[in-house]
Amino acid sequence: MARIRPEYGVPDLTGRRAVVTGASDGVGRAIATRLAAAGAEVVMPVRNRVKGTAAIARIRQEYPEAVLSLRDLDLSSLASVAALGAVLREEGRPIHILINNAGVMTPPRRESTADGFELQLGSNHLGHVALVGHLLPLLRAGRARIVSQLSVSTIRGRINWDDLNWERSYRPMAAYGQSKIAFGLFALELDRRSQAAGWGVTSNVSHPGISPTNLQRVRPEIGRMREAPQQRGIRALSRRGILVGTPETAALPALMAATGPHARGGRFYGPSGPGGLGGAPAEQQLYRPLRAVDDAAKIWQVSQDLTHVPFPV
């Protein structure tokens, strides 16, 4: 029996400029592919230019007219984030879509960023916070829609306020969940602040469900010398179209959040299948940890203090 894959029709994006982090493989490349196919100019900030160049070549095999370009970005370095912000501001072109998709997941031992933050907090959350801050003038000029990619892990967990950097103890999955909860709270607070102050940007959140990507494969650079045990099962289920998705279907919630005519700020988009693991994209109820408005206001300020990237008052 042929597998029926969920789909979402991306509207025409001719004349729009989109920035997608983590677009060199997996879900991010699938997002960039669909945006470019719809006519957007897609900027792909990457840490590894070899992988980025290969990703562009692969996209252009399918869509020869795709308008794609690479920029340098290491989200674990605030200096690298600032440098990208300076490059794009110098180009002076409005940004209409920003999809904060890149991420790192569960290094087996605590790793630090160039700035001394726990790697997942620093890359998944603080690096993206700084990126939004540096690009805010361009995002405001484009009346942008900003989509922040979370995870099904955000359904539970909490902010470890007493030890945000996991310096006294380190639990890989708890630290990963915290980084995504913090990022989600920030994104929702960004939308509230924008609406209150008239910044003109819309911020919402999405999650891709589960699909076979590089997040839990062998990653010597973060100390993972063998892939996570569940990866083989995820690949098998994905091939059979059972429960979980593919990178292409996992991209759909972020695409809906970024381009859907009815997608709204402060809302949450994800797969609508059992457990949110796969299925067609749809608006979903915010996970409980994301509903804490007081925590959102607190993480908003803490994030600015840690990154030294201020947002308008």
Image (cartoon, grey):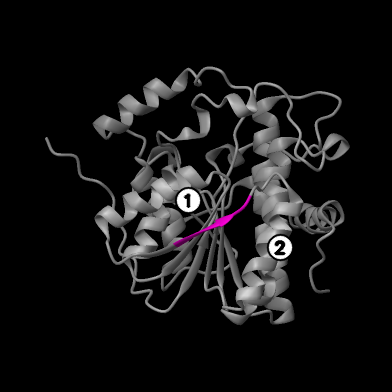
**Can you say whether 290 is above or below 133 in the image?**
above
Question: Which amino acid, by three-letter code, is at mark 1?
Answer: Ala
Q: Nearer the viewer, mark 2 or mark 1?
A: 1
**Residue 165's x, y, as percent?**
81, 36
Residue where numbered disc 2 is placed: 189
Q: Which residues are magenta?
A: 69-73
Q: Are marks 2 and 1 in contact (CB under 8 Å)?
A: no
Q: Is residue 143 left or right of residue 273?
A: right
Name the residue nearer the viewer: 283 or 97. 97
Task: State the predominant SS element of the stretch in magenta.
Answer: strand
**Can you say whether 64 is above or below 94 in the image?**
above
Q: Is residue 302 left or right of residue 193?
A: right
Q: Secondary structure at mark 1?
A: loop
Q: Is residue 274 left or right of residue 121?
A: left
**Residue 234's x, y, as percent?**
39, 27
Location of residue 142 by image quarter: bottom right
The residue shown at (44%, 35%) is 213
**Residue 248's x, y, as percent?**
34, 47
Name the residue nearer the viewer: 55 or 109. 55
Question: Which amino acid, by three-letter code, is at mark 2?
Answer: Glu
Residue where numbered disc 1 is placed: 23
